[in-house]
Image (spheres, rainbow, N blue to C red):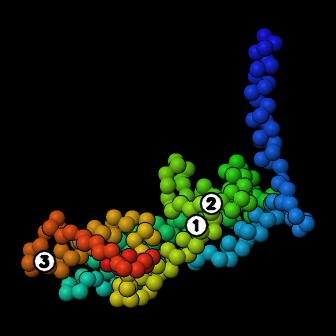
Amino acid sequence: EMTSVTGVQTCALPILITTIMNTQPKDAGGDSGMTADDIVKEKCEETLLKMPPDFIEEIFRKQIEKLKGPPNTNDKGFLAPLNIFLFQELQRLQRIISIVRSNLKNLSMAIDGTVVMTEELLDDLNAIFDARVPKAWTHDASGQEISWLSPNMGGWFTGLVDRYNLLNGWLEGSRSNMKGYWMTGFTNAQGFLTAMRQEVTRQHKKDQWALDDVISHTEVLAHEDRKSVV
């Protein structure tokens, strides 16, 4: 019986110590006098100031309704497959923007003590302190991946801003201003290729082209460009 009790205590002790260490303020080091909480809160506030503005669905829906479709067709707005694709990408990116903005605000308030510091927020605090990407930004509650992955927070956030600029430029300037498309910047790159094939098929409606007969051709350029030209 003594062995059994001792065994339980021995197994539970590391877990207890880990829990205590995670809930204690970290030593930020240096002579700044700032705790880990102070550093993370400052980072949250700085990141919130750099956040791209929200995409308001009511507004961008009306903007897309005015966008032209492919050449040599009467398609406009949501009759054009690529316009539908753009709408869906805006919805997905806005979801990510909302999650990040809410997470940063909640974490800042939790540090202040105005909301409860949950286990999830504590994990996010430790991630930001270590310059890692908070899990809430990349996965939903079920563990499903909802955004791109990056080894550090700075690289991930740069990706967020770049994706915002890509979609906003397309929305504001229409496809006539798009010299190329950043394929890996889309949350559904396969959807882009499918929409493109649908538009080509519509352009050749008189020739009775079938969607299954349209194929994508890839040409490797002599120089590297982050945005794939289509």
Q: Amino acid at mark 1?
A: Trp
3 or 1: tag closer to the N-terminus: 1
Q: Amino acid at mark 3?
A: Lys
Is the residue 74 above or below the residue 32 in the image?
A: below
Is the residue 149 above or below the residue 42 in the image?
A: above
Residue holding disc 2:
133
On residue 205, the disc is: 3
- Distance between the alpha carbons at the discs numbered 3 and 1: 42 Å
Q: Nearer the viewer, residue 106 or 3?
A: 3
Quarter-wise, where is residue 207 in the image? bottom left
Q: Are marks 2 and 1 in contact (CB under 8 Å)?
A: yes
* Residue displayed at 30% across by 69% down: 193
Quarter-wise, where is residue 128 in the image? bottom right
Quarter-wise, where is residue 184 in the image? bottom left
* Residue displayed at 69% across by 52% down: 123
Residue 89 placement, left or right of 84: right
Percent x, y for residue 229?
Answer: 35, 79
Residue holding disc 1:
156
Residue 45 in sight: yes
3 or 2: tag closer to the N-terminus: 2
Q: Amino acid at mark 2?
A: Val
Is label 3 in a helix, a strand or a loop?
loop
Is the residue 114 above or below the residue 47 in the image?
A: above
Q: Nearer the viewer, mark 3 or mark 2?
A: 2
